[in-house]
Image (cartoon, helix red, strand yellow):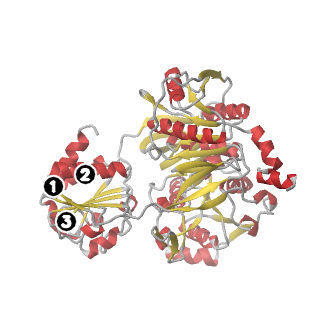
């Protein structure tokens, strides 16, 4: 066995050089009210596992003098935390944040930089990836490492999550990824973990070029029903206007829209645009709650691509049940009332 | 005002079925459409054109069939169309695609606005907007829902983690339009004919933009697909309403729907 073969097995000379250049896994954290966001904690846990596999350090990044959140990062798996400070880093703005992070990455040379796939991460990650002409994997639902290549294995959703693809960039470094909040398991905190929190200060950062004028209170133009993520559908079985109102409130609570069957349209509870099915709209929501709908074929055709279907009906033989992820034999109005009460009760 | 709109032609997701049990993807109907978010971006550009007058240039990076997507853009009201198409661009990865698009937009300079769709419905890609903004040195507004010109500045209602906020930016800028923005209009019949008979689509090759095949080589590989577990249907439960509500909420939490 000659040396070349061994070297190629170990990844070759080129890889050895790259290894020396880029190492460590960085997590760009987010802070909400009382500490790190749950997604940031989970990301740290994942980064810790990957760092153990690669034999490198986990480093956390926070903006502003967030000492408490910094030590929290250490308890969840970071070895070092950099608190980036400077004029313009007080509140979020793309230009100064990107510049500060880019300088930090240039000097620290991490091999992997992780963000949450929130608006915060979504603003920063693509710009940084472009600056380093590096790969970026967006909205990952899982991460791993290829230990032979020392490369990130990113599982990204395709066709809106109908299936997933595992992507890898064998040579380009650093590697960036944004991870969908809520998909990674919550790690345990170890308050006795040792690590250091360092303040890093940057001056002469570029000013923000986009001015935030504040929240937009007026209602937005409603997206069409066909693009709604959550739909609460009423059928004749909700009984009366009161049941429809409960369904409407549930839809609002879940950030969705109210729709209905032909029966509900005939009763005058919904408008023509809210009709689901063959004569109305075809939808593909992530969640569809059918209240008091029997499951006529005309209705079912419109919701064939629903990701999660919950059906509530008093009739245990209702045609909708075999198609439902969860069928509930109960009075729709009573269940709607209980759902609204449970959601209002601070869950 | 000169507005460049980048549109991507994708396979219509409605024509694709994913069989989770057999772990296979079936393309039942090979129909190519403009990526929905990109179409919203086109609509946003056309609304600015209607209100204030503007020159709208649609550009697309893709296979020769993307010509149809650009003709559709012309039929909807775009003034010019540019197709960047080349054998060397087949299988291009996201980092390089952004570099190619950025150079094409530089060639169309000066553009006051660059509009793109926020996300691609097929690959789920959510990075071209930010990459283009960085490469072109422009300020960015992502997840835009409505745009309006207010004097010299552009006022944009955008979503921040799902909540609408109002921001202002002075052109030149890059705006990524959310797929939740107002959908595109329908083209006038006569314009559809004109788009094919009278209007032209310029075709630029990788060489025209000064790229060599080596620079365009993809650096990202697929290690295969993973399929979510098959849906288990027909699970029926019965009980008191409060208990049922609890079961429903438990399922919603488990599926991360709340």
Q: Quadrant of residue B169?
A: top right
Q: Chain of mark 2?
A: B
Q: How many numbered markers are drawn?
A: 3
Whether marks 2 and 3 lie on the same chain: no
Quadrant (top left/top right/bottom left/bottom right) for the C terminus of chain A: top left
Whether residue B170 appears in this view of the structure is no
The residue singled out by tag 3 in the image is A264
Whether residue B6 appears in this view of the structure is yes
Mark 2, secondary structure of its residue: helix
Disc with the residue nearer the chain's start (2 vs 1) = 1
Of B205 and A107, nearer the camera is: A107
CB atoms of marks 2 and 3 within 8 Å: no
Question: What residue is drawn where x is 24% and y is 40%?
Answer: A344
Q: Is residue B187 above or below residue A19?
A: below
Of B194 and A334, nearer the camera is: A334
The residue singled out by tag 2 in the image is B247
The nearer-to-camera label among 1 and 3 is 1
Could you classify mark 3 by the number of other residues whose Cα lies within 10 Å: few (under 14), some (14-19), or many (20 or more)?
Answer: many
CB atoms of marks 2 and 1 within 8 Å: yes
Q: Is residue B102 above or below residue B207?
A: above
The residue singled out by tag 1 in the image is B239
Could you classify mark 1 by the number of other residues whose Cα lies within 10 Å: few (under 14), some (14-19), or many (20 or more)?
Answer: few
Q: Is residue B190 above or below residue A309?
A: below
Distance from disc 2 to disc 1, alpha carbons, whole Å, reads 10 Å
């Amino acid at each position: 066995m000659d040396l070349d073969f061994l070297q190629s097995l170990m990844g070759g000379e080129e890889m050895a050089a790259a290894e020396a250049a880029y190492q460590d896994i960085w997590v760009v954290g987010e802070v909400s009210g009382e500490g790190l966001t749950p997604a940031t904690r989970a990301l740290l846990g994942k980064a810790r596992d990957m760092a153990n596999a690669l034999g490198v350090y986990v480093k956390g990044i926070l903006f502003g003098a967030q000492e408490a959140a910094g030590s929290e990062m250490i308890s969840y798996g970071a070895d070092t935390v950099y608190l980036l400070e400077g004029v313009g880093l007080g509140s979020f703005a793309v230009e100064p944040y990107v510049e500060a992070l880019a300088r930090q990455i240039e000097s620290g040379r991490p091999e992997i930089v992780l963000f949450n796939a929130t608006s915060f991460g979504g603003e920063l990650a693509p710009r940084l990836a472009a600056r380093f002409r590096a790969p970026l994997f967006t909205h990952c639902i899982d991460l791993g490492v290829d230990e032979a290549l020392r490369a990130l294995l990113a599982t990204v959703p395709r066709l809106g999550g109908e299936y997933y693809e595992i992507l890898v960039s064998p040579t380009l470094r650093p590697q960036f990824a944004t991870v969908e909040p809520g998909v990674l398991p919550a790690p345990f905190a170890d308050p006795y973990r040792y690590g250091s929190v360092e303040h890093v200060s940057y001056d002469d950062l570029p000013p923000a070029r986009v001015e935030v004028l504040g929240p937009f209170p007026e209602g937005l133009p409603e997206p069409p029903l066909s693009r709604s993520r959550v739909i609460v559908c009423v059928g004749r079985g909700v009984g009366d206007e009161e049941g429809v109102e409960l369904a409407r409130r549930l839809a609002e609570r879940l950030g969705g829209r109210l729709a209905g069957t032909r029966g509900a349209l005939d009763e005058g509870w919904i408008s023509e645009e809210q009709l689901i099915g063959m004569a109305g709209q075809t939808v593909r929501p992530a969640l569809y709650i059918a209240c008091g709908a029997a499951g006529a074929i005309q209705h079912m055709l419109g919701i064939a691509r629903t990701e999660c279907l919950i059906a509530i009906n008093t009739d245990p033989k209702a045609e909708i049940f075999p198609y439902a992820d969860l069928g509930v034999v109960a009075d729709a109005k009573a269940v709607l009332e209980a759902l609204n009460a449970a959601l209002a009760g601070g869950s | 005002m000169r507005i460049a709109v980048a549109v991507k032609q994708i396979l219509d997701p409605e024509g694709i079925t994913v069989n989770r049990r057999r772990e296979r993807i079936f393309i039942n109907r090979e129909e190519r459409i403009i990526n929905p978010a990109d179409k919203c971006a086109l609509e946003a550009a056309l609304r600015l054109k209607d209100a204030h007058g503007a020159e709208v240039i649609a550009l697309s990076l893709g296979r020769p069939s993307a010509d149809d997507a650009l003709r559709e853009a012309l039929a909807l009201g775009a003034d010019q169309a540019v197709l960047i198409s080349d054998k060397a661009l087949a299988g291009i990865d996201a980092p390089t695609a952004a570099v190619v698009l950025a150079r094409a937009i530089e060639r169309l300079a000066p553009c006051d606005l660059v509009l793109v769709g926020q996300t691609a419905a097929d690959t789920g890609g959510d990075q071209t907007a930010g990459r283009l903004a960085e490469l072109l040195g422009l300020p960015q507004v992502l997840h835009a829902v409505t745009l309006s010109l207010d004097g010299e500045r552009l006022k944009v209602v955008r979503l921040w983690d799902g909540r609408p906020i109002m921001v202002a930016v002075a052109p030149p800028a890059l705006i990524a339009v959310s797929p939740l923005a107002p959908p595109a209009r329908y083209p006038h019949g006569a314009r559809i004919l004109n788009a094919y008979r009278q209007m032209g689509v310029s075709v630029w090759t990788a060489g025209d933009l000064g790229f060599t095949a080596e620079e365009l080589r993809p650096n990202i590989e697929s290690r295969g697909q993973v399929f979510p577990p098959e849906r288990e249907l027909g699970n029926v439960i019965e009980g008191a309403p409060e208990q049922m509500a609890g079961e429903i909420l438990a399922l919603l939490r488990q599926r991360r729907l709340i």
